[in-house]
Image: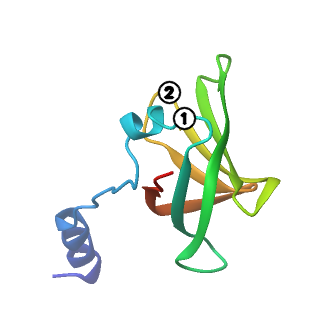
Amino acid sequence: MSLAKTILEKLSETVVAERYAMTRAEFDALKKGDTYEITWDDSWAKSQKATVFVKSRSTSKKYNTDKVSFGIKDKPRFVGFFLYSRDGGEPSFAVGDMGAVLTSIRKVSK
């Protein structure tokens, strides 16, 4: 059996499971002022953590995108974390203008 055929068979057997740290329903439940502890991975480092609060929500009807902006608890004027939900799908996470992977999010009780 050729190497290419073996690789194609292995790839066809591989199942890629997409795992999101947050569902669309949880995204919709985010309310302005709520506090969360988030953990994310990006190209610079793994398992970074921050305590953030929901600063604002916005919707773009033109691009069919919902956006949630987070502020850092210690620096309330800084907004550098965003969640986007495009076409009503699962949310994606960004740090500034860089895409990142949200690994966990936990609501902090007041």
User: Considering only order in the chain, which callout, 1 or 2, is on the residue closer to the N terminus?
Assistant: 1
Question: Exactly how many numbered labels are in the figure?
Answer: 2
Q: CA distance from mark 2 to mark 1?
A: 20 Å
Q: Position of residue 56 (x, y in %)?
A: 69, 35
Front residue (pair 31, 101) = 31
The answer to which quarter of the image holds residue 18 is bottom left
From this view, report whether residue 43 is shown above or below residue 12.
below
Residue under numbered circle 2: 87
Badge 1 element: loop
Q: Amino acid at mark 2?
A: Asp
Residue occupying the point 37% across, 43% down: 23
Give residue 69's position: percent from left, percent from top.
68, 43
* Residue tagged 1: 31
Q: Amino acid at mark 1?
A: Lys
Mark 2 vs mark 1, foreground winner is 1
Question: Residue 48: x, y in percent?
Answer: 58, 75
Indicate the colouring scheme: rainbow
Residue 87 against residue 12 in the figure, above or below: above
Left/right of residue 97 with respect to residue 84 in the rendered view: right
Relative to 19, does residue 29 appear above or below in the rendering? above
Would you say the residues marked 2 and 1 are in contact, meaning their CB atoms lie under 8 Å apart? Answer: no
Question: Where, by quadrant of the figure, is residue 41 drawn?
Answer: bottom right
Quarter placement of the N terminus? bottom left
Which residue is found at the position 40% from the left and 49% from the top? Answer: 22
Residue beneath the point at 18% across and 69% down: 9
* Outermost residue toward the top in this view: 61
